[in-house]
Amino acid sequence: MQEKGADALPYGGSRAFSASTVMIKQILKRYRTDSCTFHADPQNLQDGFLLRLRIREPVTADNSGVLYEIPGTLRIEAGYLTQEEADQGWGRRENYSSYPDSTGNVPVLEASVFLDVPYHPDWTELKLGIPLAMFDLTAGDLLLLYDGLHLYFLYDGIVINENFPAGTLKPSLGLPVRGENLALIEFSSDIRNLECSEFERILDRSIHAYSPAGHSAWAGDVVNLWHNGVYHLFFLYDHHHHGNRWGCGVHYFYHMTTTDFVNWTDHGPIFEIEEAWQSFGTGTPFFFDGKFWFAVGFHTGRCIPCNLYSSHMHEFYREKGYTEAVSHEAIRAAGLYPNGANLAVSEDGGRTFRLTHQMFHWAENPSVYSKPDGTLFMCIGDGLWEADRPEGPWKQIRPGFPPQGEDTPLDYTAECPSFFEKDGYKYIIMGARGFWRTGKDSDDYRDCAASGEDIYDGLSVPMAVNCGGRLILSGWINGFGFGSVIIHRELIQYEDGHLGMKWLEEAAPRAEEENLLYRSKDTFRFETDPKESYYYEIDAVSTAGGVIRVIFDRECELRLDSARCEAQVGPVGGERITPIYERAGRKDPHRFDDTHFKARNFTIAQVRGIDGAYRIRISQFRDTKMNSTLIDAEIAGCRTILSNRPQSEIHAVSAVGENGAEIRSMSVYAYRMEECR
């Protein structure tokens, strides 16, 4: 790991990726407190404060407990948790269990502020924590920043965790209490004097399974754009698996770019939270009239239980037949709150965006695209719309499409539509269920998901874009809550418009001889270390009724059934899992419990290329931050399937052929990626 203009950062160690030419540049913020005056006693905390502390000794079971408390206002305490305790409650949100000490226990530090929130009297204690195995608080200072809108932990000037308060800080109910293990605590009210600068951190790793820096920071819904040879990837920056602001999520977008899909820059946020009621959902970037724009969803209803403007915009639409943008100033003057679809525009070529404070539609996940004729197109689920400019007027051109809800074959979702086209075919992917495509040079869409002809492979809310002829798809992985790591794919278009899917080759592991661990043409079993990552190449031959099984001992197996043209990840030796399209019309509440969206055990249908000779490529990627193993397979170069296996213990991998299918060879390579979290 290399860094420009900064000391080593506290995010963990590193190991070299096998293809050493790849990199990710992260542009991070560093705060300086040189102009802040600190005092031993707290002063005017309600107006915001900066707290600096240090502890005497590493936290153990003998010295855990309250470090400092202002009763009723602020509490800072240390805990020494077992792995089981660390994976419960708020500890699970903080991802504590991934960071034990040398004994296997998990020392932590947590800060709580206590607040009055008028519209949510049940919102009182807001918490933030860190696993102390990552930070030496006996040698370095930890800072806690509260400004009424943000609650930050900073170490070495870097934001290492965040939450978002609302309301006002409660007054003190008594004198401060100090714990014996507290070495230093100081307060500053000069938060406006904090200085902030940018610096770069270079990760020598590929983009595979990427998440932003921070022990509890994750990537949620992604959206993408291709413009002038640059791929723009935006993702909802998540902390605590949607847990910020008492479970409201409080997301905003981070921005990444690449020109070659090998070297990437993580530019950080495109805009930040401005109000205590704001929370952003998915939208899309688009290029219009010489500028980069962003249609972004405001999920205000998560925080504000009433007085939202959407019903008034509905009423305007019913009367006028179109929607037009309304300023936030006018909405707030009426005693209401903006929600739904809002606009942002970039003044620096697409790196960052400025919110225009205009609500133009009630859709909370608007997908807006520029058309070749210079107009705009919007897909919101349950309706297609068009306009001549981002502010509107927006008019509906196709009501009820794509269809959604319980009356559709698979209870299609309305969220996060992804529209793209290539060679005369148009496609729409929905966030969880639903996939449509047209015939060539047609606008007539047909339901592909109901016949099993979708492209879901385990990724959540997949989004695709035509990148100069290449269809690049990105998404995140479900499995233990909202947000995780980002995965990329490349779609394959056949002559009939059907889509296959393969790995994004620029991010794929390499079969390098220097990393070869095992190769055989007669024995197909390899013992593994559960904490390591591996790359497999398995050559197979199957008859029309043959089955190939790749078994990850004591965890799961990949089953390729050429008779049914199905790929399944499920329990070792388990029964067939019904693919989702066969559940059309079923109404039982558990019909989607084992489908692609959970990224655990599921089946995908209409898999091509598994009748005859073909190759299976598998990444068994151990992600320490998630404490999980990702089983990612590319099948015959034209289909992928991905399963998230939290807390897995895989000790061996074997491959077998049944019913006339055979394994011809098996090669295993070390697959090393930098761990920098």
Image (cartoon, helix red, strand yellow):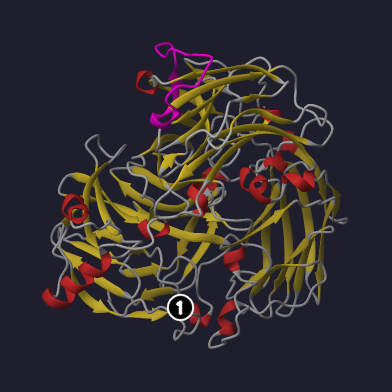
Query: Residue placed at 66% from the left, 32% from the top?
Result: 77
Residue 14 appears in the figure: no
Would residue 124 appear left or right of 426 to someone viewing this image? right
Would residue 165 appear left or right of 674 to someone viewing this image? left
Residue beneath disc 1 = 448
Rendered view: 418 above or below 233: below
Residue 383, given in percent of the width and then of the height, sits at 29, 74
Q: Quadrant of residue 292?
A: top left
Looking at numbered disc 1 in the image, what kind of residue is underneath it? Answer: Cys
Q: Quadrant of the C terminus?
A: top right
Rendered view: 670 above or below 327: above
Count up the numbered dots: 1
Would residue 447 appear left or right of 97 to someone viewing this image? left
Query: Residue placed at 64% from the left, 47% from the top?
Result: 90
Rendered view: 488 above or below 82: below
Of residues 456 and 96, which is closer to you in this image? 96
Rendered view: 21 above or below 4: below
Q: Is residue 289 magenta?
A: no
Query: Residue placed at 41% from the left, 66% from the top?
Result: 415
Residue 616, given in percent of the width and then of the height, sits at 68, 59
Residue 540, given in percent of the width and then of the height, sits at 74, 63
Of residues 125 and 534, which is closer to you in this image? 125
Name, please, the residue furthest toward the front.
174
Q: Quadrant of the N terminus?
A: top right
Query: Residue placed at 47% from the left, 39% from the top?
Result: 170
Of residues 170 and 600, which is closer to you in this image? 170
Residue 500 appears in the figure: yes
Please report the bounds of the magenta region as a residue range: 27-48
Residue 146, given in percent of the width and then of the height, sits at 45, 31
Of residues 138 and 233, which is closer to you in this image? 138
**What crowding class fits label 1: few (fewer than 14 Cα within 10 Å), some (14-19), or many (20 or more)?**
some
Q: Quadrant of residue 371?
A: bottom left
